[in-house]
Amino acid sequence: MSQISQTTMDKILEWAVTISFILMILTVMLQVIARYALPWSPHWTEEMARFCFIYMVSLGAGLAVKDRAYINVSIFLDRLTTKSRIWMDTLILLSIFVLMMIMFGFSIPLMKIVSLQDSAAMKVNMAFIYFSMTCMSFFVAYYSMIEIQRNFKKILQNQ
């Protein structure tokens, strides 16, 4: 994928995560204000906040791989040489890629199974909610592959 389209996809994902986060915050604020200021509170807010959180995490996971913003324990990696560290990082990213491809394969039939059910409060088809697994596995695998390619370029430049 070209650099321009990758940057565009990064921006779209960043905006989707931001919108999901803002929507989640507004939904929770509505619930809290309604509890204390109104005689009733909307019954759908808890479900909406949960769905926003699910999509926020699912879409943000790929960006976390791209930016290396996930939590890692580097006590063993710090003891390796630079070249060994790059190889180990590549092995870790390859493991993530394989896991996400397996998850992607299982998430598609799962969406078909859950498409028969709607959520309790909002009556949203659950296939839309489970689609977040498909998105997450695709984007994490995609960004893992990009990082693997960058690592191979580093390895080739040092030789």
Image (cartoon, helix red, strand yellow):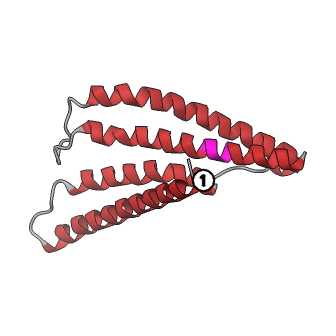
Give the left or right position of residue 139, taking residue 147 as reference. left
Q: Residue 12: x percent and y percent?
A: 43, 58
Q: Residue 78: x percent and y percent?
A: 83, 52
How many numbered dots are placed on residues in this image?
1
- Could you say which quadrant of the image residue 106 lies in? top left
Give the left or right position of residue 135, taking residue 49 as reference. right
Whether residue 56 appears in magenta in the rendering, the answer is no
- Could you say which quadrant of the image residue 91 lies in? top right
Please say if 94 is above or below 77.
above
Helix, strand or loop: magenta stretch: helix
Give the left or right position of residue 151, taking residue 2 as reference. right
The residue beneath circle 1 is 66
Q: Nearer the viewer, residue 23 or 120?
A: 23
Q: Residue furthest bottom?
A: 37
The residue at 26%/63% (across/down) is 27
Q: Residue 26: x percent and y percent?
A: 28, 67
Q: Which residues are magenta?
A: 144-148
The residue at 35%/63% (across/down) is 19
Instruction: Inspect this view and state whether residue 76 appears.
Output: no
Q: Residue furthest left?
A: 39
Give the left or right position of residue 78, taking residue 134 as reference. right
Instruction: Inspect this view and state whether residue 88 appears.
Output: yes
Please say if 1 is above or below 130.
below
Q: Nearer the viewer, residue 33 or 130?
A: 130
